[in-house]
Image (spheres, coloured by chain):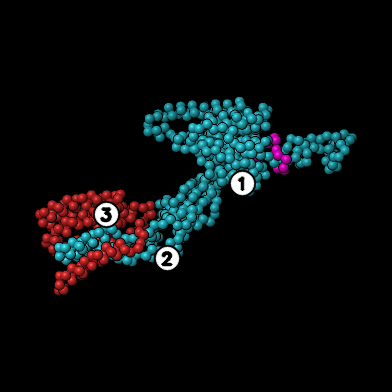
Amino acid sequence: MSRGVLGVSAVAVAIVLAVTGIGAGPGIGAAVGLETASLGLVLLVLALWRWPQVLAPAMVLLAVPWGFAMAEEPGGAEAIAVGAGLVLLGELGGWCQDRRTVVPEHPREVARRAARTLGLVGAGVAVSATLLATSALPAPGSLVRLLVGLGAALAVVALTTLRRWDSS
Amino acid sequence: LWAYTALGAIGLVAALVSGRAELAVAVAPVALIALAGVVLAERPALDAAVVLPVDRTLEGSAVDSTVAITCSSARAVVDVVVPFSGPLTIEDPAEGRLAWSSAGGGVERRLRLAGRATSWGIVRLGPVWTRAHGPLGLVRWDAAVGHQKVLRVLPSAPTLRSLLPHHDPRATAGPHLARRPGDGIEFADARPYQPGDRLRSINWRLSSRRGDLWVDERHPERSADLVVLVDTFADDASDASLALARTVRVAWMLAQAHLAGHDRVGLIAFGGYPAWLAPGSGERARYEVLDKLLATTAAWTEARRSVQILPRQVIPPGASIVAVTPLHDRRMVDALADLRHRGLAVAAVRVDATDRLPPSAAFGGQVSAVIAAAAVRIWRLELERRALVLGDAGVPVVLWAAGHDPASVLASLRRVGRAPARRWA
């Protein structure tokens, strides 16, 4: 699939995420969300065009409007949809960046990559739904919940950074 | 990967701080993908090599090769790029680039590489650039593996039907007739018998007519030294030379024919980067001349160039020098005249490359077709004037225009060489 199609698709997903997030947020959150999402959109375009390093801040900034919205008025279905949207945005962005190569992409590989993208989005929806259902269950005291949550958050960063790999 | 990691970490911390499970729900998929992508990633052991069945071929020939890849992970997606330089046109892969994506091909994978050698020169393939993708495509490893392979594309020069004459051959046996009589095959003269002459030299038919004994004299066959001087002056500062490809083709044709005739052949690349090869014979000299010719490049220089820098052994006494040149550079004219003034036998093949001049449209409409045609005519006149200057200096010059059979052009050089002025000899 061409890089242009993938880039436009990623930008479209980002715009949908930002616009719905700004629309769902409260007044002050919407104003801040508008600014961060705009900056995130610019960074996303730059990441897809030339500087892949700025994809991480772009995705974080694009998720800010929905962060404000969910902190103010939480909604389970919206959270699942946002999770799926973020995965879709990340996959399309990564795919677009991978196409900055002389290696041709054959239809079989396009189908394979598209299937993987859809599978990850589907798996993300399943994970989010499971987590949402689990969060409704009665849990021990707030301190235990805080520690477990903190441990989960740290595990993501720790495992990612401590693992010895030499990815480019 | 970093986008997923940052988003997951920030979202989870925000969920903890705000106490909203929905924030964790939203970022949990990206956090899990990042985790899975890193935890499942194992660097595969990769090895790759370009497999060339031959190390030399003729220009215009098909080049069929493979890229052999060994990957420890049978399911890993491996991107392969083989950088290449030289006169090679890629036919397979169809995109014209040596780049493949090899997915799920097993531990041993073979990728076909087919092309055509468009001109003489050296084709360098590799080393192979590989990129292995980890699970979920979040981690990848880049490496250059294998060694560079070299394919020498030989000029497909037509075979010469005869060699250039040498009037001062060496003492060793060869294809050229020496002027001094001696043992040989070619009849030279007959003279009265003298004591010591061999009986097999007696010409019985002539002796019976003359009434006394007469013997035949013959020309001994001797080898000779030929030094091919290749003009490597660039036409402009971008190191471009319109005539270099043709020049080297003619030089190789001459060298090949004379080496096959057991002559000693030397080579001088005279131009931007002067280089030389002392005359030699046999297979070793053939390969040395070929390597030197294939590595010949034009280079722009404004420095003074003189044949005085050449070592003595490059042009042995009695050697003939044939310069292959488009005469685009005035310094080449001076150098050939200088060699001739030193008493050496010098001739020149003028390679015409005016058909390769860019059309007037290449100048963005700034030059009209009429002016461009006039400029080409003036340029041709200047080249002819330079050839006349060389002729006056005693260097015969023959023209090789595009489409002419080089062998017939060199045959005309033989005729020029026998001209009464004896400039060639």
As helix, strand or loop, the secondary structure at mark 3 comes to helix
Instruction: Give the quarter of the image for residue A93.
Output: bottom left
Check contact, mark 1 vs mark 3: CB within 8 A: no
- How far, Cα to Cα, is label 2 from label 1? 44 Å
Image disc number at residue B286: 1
- How far, Cα to Cα, is label 1 from label 3? 58 Å
Q: Residues within 10 Å of mark 3 (few under 14, many from 20)?
A: many
Check contact, mark 2 vs mark 1: CB within 8 A: no
- Where residue B417 sits: x, y (%)? 65, 32
Q: Is residue B205 magenta?
A: no
Residue to which mark 2 is pinned: B72
Name the residue located 46 percent from the left edge and 34 percent from the top edge: B236
Instruction: Give the quarter of the image for residue B42.
Output: bottom left
Inspect the image, locate mark 3, and give the three-letter code of the amino acid beneath it.
Leu
- Where residue B232 sits: x, y (%)? 53, 37
Q: Nearer the viewer, residue A133 or B363?
A: A133
Q: Nearer the viewer, residue B90 or A79?
A: A79
Q: Residues within 10 Å of mark 2 (few under 14, many from 20)?
A: some
As helix, strand or loop, the secondary structure at mark 1 comes to helix
Image quadrant holding the C terminus of chain A, namely: bottom left
Chain B tint as drawn: cyan
- Where residue B157 sits: x, y (%)? 57, 43
- Where residue B311 sits: x, y (%)? 61, 37
Q: Is residue B169 magenta?
A: yes
Above or below residue B354? Residue A127 is below
> Where does the magenta region start and end?
B163-175
Above or below residue A16? Residue B348 is above
Chain A tint as drawn: red
Residue to which mark 3 is pinned: A55
Q: Residues within 10 Å of mark 1 (few under 14, many from 20)?
A: many
